[in-house]
Amino acid sequence: MSTRTNEPLAWLLFSAGGVMAAMTLPALLLILGVAVPLGWIAAPTYERLAWLLANPIVRLALFVVCATSLLHWAHRFRYTLYDGLQLKHLHEGINFACYGGAILGSAVAAYLLLL
């Protein structure tokens, strides 16, 4: 009888994080990192951003983008260390550092968005 692993869940989170990062982060970087500093569009006011972040759906969407992007990074970085640097003998430490960092970053994002 074959044993079940958590590998499909890890690949699911990796895929979800890749999609979320590819769809949302370029738009956010273009708007907030290029268009606003160059004066192409007006910078959002504090009141407008506070009003936007008061919506729980916006907070949830921001959390999902942050958490899935961090999990995508963790999975990609883990396999970069395994295959690229041939550090498979440090399996447990790499898993702890990568996924622990992603979980810690997600917890910080959740804390900041729930303030």
Image (cartoon, grey):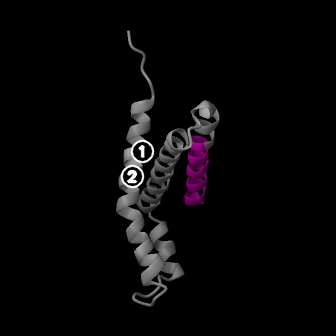
Q: Which percent across, then down, holds residue 79?
A: 49, 41
Q: Which quarter shows the C terminus?
A: bottom right
Please state the extent of the stretch shown in magenta in the rendering.
Answer: 98-115
The foreground one among 77 and 51 is 77
Q: Estimate the x, y position of residue 87 in percent, counting from the top left.
A: 59, 37
Is residue 95 found inside the magenta-colored segment of the image?
Answer: no
The reply to whether dot 2 and dot 1 touch (C-beta < 8 Å) is yes
From the viewer's perspective, tell me whether residue 29 is left or right of residue 106: left
The residue labelled by disc 2 is 18
Q: Main secondary structure of the magenta part?
A: helix
Q: Which mark is residue 45?
A: none
Q: What residue type is labelled 2?
A: Gly
Taking the spot 39% from the left edge, 13% from the top edge, the residue there is 2
Mark pair 2, 1: CA separation: 6 Å
Q: Which residue is drawn at 56% across and 53% down?
A: 110
Disc marking residue 14 = 1
Q: Which residue is nearer to you in this view: 89 or 28?
A: 89
Outermost residue on the bottom side: it is 39
